[in-house]
């Protein structure tokens, strides 16, 4: 059953890949909240298992190829958001060094990292109430110009 679902998702990914040149729209249609992957794998355990399959790895390669072909600035600026992430200065320096090593910008490196599966056991729980639970936590996104550079 899992393998059948994974194959069906991969086939849909291949179809979308053939028609969608914008990597961000491809990601949205495939991996977004209402995308093919989330509507196919509604159980979190099943989703986590899918994210460790070769089919998911192939989808990640498709995203990487689309990003290579048209850069990170292909998305219309109205579709881009900025988030603010607080991190220790040492981590920012680490990211800058890693970006230099792989020959990319910190922005592109971070986007690549955000697109990867991470085991939820490696993510510490939040100590700040979620917006979903009705807290007055400020929004950390804003519309901004989106370009291929930082």
Image (tube, grey):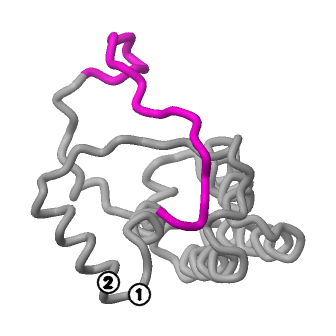
The magenta-colored residue range is: 129-150
From the top left corner, tell me how far across and down residue 105 is, in percent: 42, 73
- Residue 42 figure quarter: top right
Q: Residue at x 59, y 78 (%)?
A: 64
Report the front residue among 7 and 132.
132
Please say whether residue 49 is visible from this viewpoint.
Answer: no
Q: Residue at x 61, y 46 (%)?
A: 145
- Residue 37 figure quarter: bottom right
Q: Quadrant of the N terminus?
A: bottom right
Q: Is residue 21 above or below residue 100?
A: above
Residue under label 1 = 103
Q: Residues within 10 Å of mark 1 (few under 14, many from 20)?
A: few
Q: Residue at x 66, y 79 (%)?
A: 62
Q: Are marks 1 and 2 in contact (CB under 8 Å)?
A: yes
Please say whether residue 53 is visible from this viewpoint.
Answer: yes
From the top left corner, tell me how far across and down residue 53 is, in percent: 51, 77
**Magenta portion: prevailing SS class:** loop
Report the front residue among 137 and 126.
137
* Helix, strand or loop at mark 1: loop
- State how far apart marks 1 and 2 are (Cα): 5 Å
Give the number of marks: 2
From the top left corner, tell me how far across and down residue 82 is, in percent: 48, 43
Residue under label 2 = 100
| Residue 139 on the magenta segment | yes
Q: Residue at x 33, y 11 (%)?
A: 136
Q: Residues within 10 Å of mark 2 (few under 14, many from 20)?
A: few
Instruction: Report the side of 13 relative to 134 (left or right).
Output: right
| Residue 106 on the magenta segment | no
């Amino acid at each position: 059953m899992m393998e059948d679902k994974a194959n069906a998702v991969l086939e849909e990914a291949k179809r979308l890949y053939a028609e969608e040149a914008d990597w961000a729209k491809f990601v949205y249609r495939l991996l977004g909240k209402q995308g093919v992957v989330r509507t196919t794998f509604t159980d979190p355990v099943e989703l986590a298992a899918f994210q460790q399959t070769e089919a998911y790895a192939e989808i990640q390669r498709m995203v990487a190829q689309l990003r290579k072909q048209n850069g990170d600035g292909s998305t219309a600026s109205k579709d881009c958001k900025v988030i603010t992430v607080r991190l220790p200065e040492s981590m920012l320096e680490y990211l800058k060094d890693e970006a230099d090593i792989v020959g990319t910008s910190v922005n592109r490196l971070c986007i690549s990292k955000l697109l990867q599966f991470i085991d939820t056991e490696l993510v510490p729980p939040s100590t700040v109430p979620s917006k979903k639970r009705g807290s007055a936590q400020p929004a950390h996104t804003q519309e901004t110009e989106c370009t291929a550079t930082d």
